[in-house]
Image (spheres, rainbow, N blue to C red):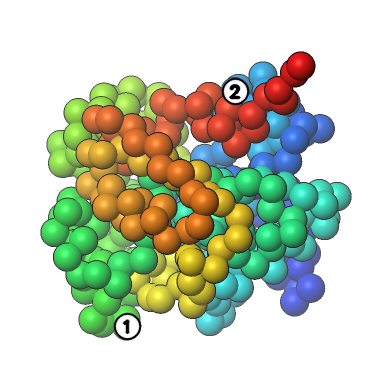
Amino acid sequence: MLDKTMTLADGRKQAFDIYGDPAGTPLFLFHGLPSCRRIGVTFHDVAVERHVAVVCPDRPGVGLSDYQPRRRIVDYPKDIAALADHLGWERFTVLGISGGGPYAAAVAHDLPGRVIRAGIASGIGELSNASVFAEMIPANRLPYRLLRSLHVASYALAAISALIYTTRLADSFFHRMAAMMPPSDAKILADGPFMQFLKDEVRESFRQGLRGFATEQLLVVLPWQFLLENVRVPIIFWHGDQDHNAPYSLAQNMACAVPGSRLIVWGGGGHLASVEHVPEILDELFPAPVRA
């Protein structure tokens, strides 16, 4: 079920897609950056088999969701609580992919009574330590370094990104990205239909223009305004040890910070490794009951 919407208390429209089994066990999937609700389709087939309902919402200003001025990562749990109420979900599991990781952590932090389990795959962590930039590919290192010291650059960087992702430049850019990434990621991007899907879903994320992406990118480099040490829901982290978009060291730091968490390492995996590990992710988040 695509392009569903609900109206939040402040009048904003929140858009979401539903994948998998609509009557299944509830899972919120938080997309990356740049990305949108459409990424949920990568979980659809496995979620149908495992009877999981995957709801993937657009964050404010992304895709079909209305922009929210002056928003912070810590504002997002309220939107998800409202969406859960709208869906009739009292309790649910959350999973953040890449740039969706901070939002999964924030929801687990703010809604411990409603979040059953939490997972973060290939997640971006807090970028408070400048040394992590040295581990990133140039396409991430340069803008994030600039944003840390010059917040007003967010719209200029968003304009450049929109020009790249939404025009004919996308083809050459994705091929250049593949050349910077580890062999495992390059292999995934060599799949023509999947490459086209990525280009289409990223283009959809810019449907409303620059503001959503500019805010998303800026929030990556700002303090999250909550402590991972205070997250009371243990988080399962998955991360490729060859990820140079969101370096592996970020996952190590987050897993050490969140009490009771686990870090599962995808040896040789890059930033796109989650695409090939959907069955494993869902099996970990929704373990089969032990039978006597």
Please name the residue shown 71% across and 23% down the image.
290
Residue 161, by quadrant, is bottom left
Image location (x, y in percent) of residue 38: 55, 41
State the residue in front, 131 or 177: 131
The quarter of the picture where the C terminus appears is: top right
Whether residue 66 sits left or right of residue 102 in the image: it is right
Which residue is label 1 attached to? 152
Tell me the SS state at disc 2: helix
Whether residue 185 sits left or right of residue 34 in the image: it is left
Q: Is residue 232 above or below residue 38?
A: below
Image location (x, y in percent) of residue 245: 27, 49
The quarter of the picture where the N terminus appears is: top right
Whether residue 228 sits left or right of residue 143 in the image: it is right
State the residue in front, 54 or 215: 54
Numbered circle sitting on residue 14: none
Please name the residue shown 24% across and 70% down the image.
129
Q: Residue furthest front?
A: 292
Dots 1, 2 in contact, CB < 8 A: no
Camera-near label (1 vs 2) is 2
Residue 27, by quadrant, is top right
| Res 217 visible | no
Image location (x, y in percent) of residue 105: 53, 59
- Upstream in sequence: badge 1 or badge 2: 2
Look at label 2 and name its amino acid.
Val
Whether residue 200 sits left or right of residue 114 in the image: it is left
State the residue in front, 289 or 177: 289
Q: Is residue 232 above or below residue 43?
A: below
Which residue is label 2 attached to? 46
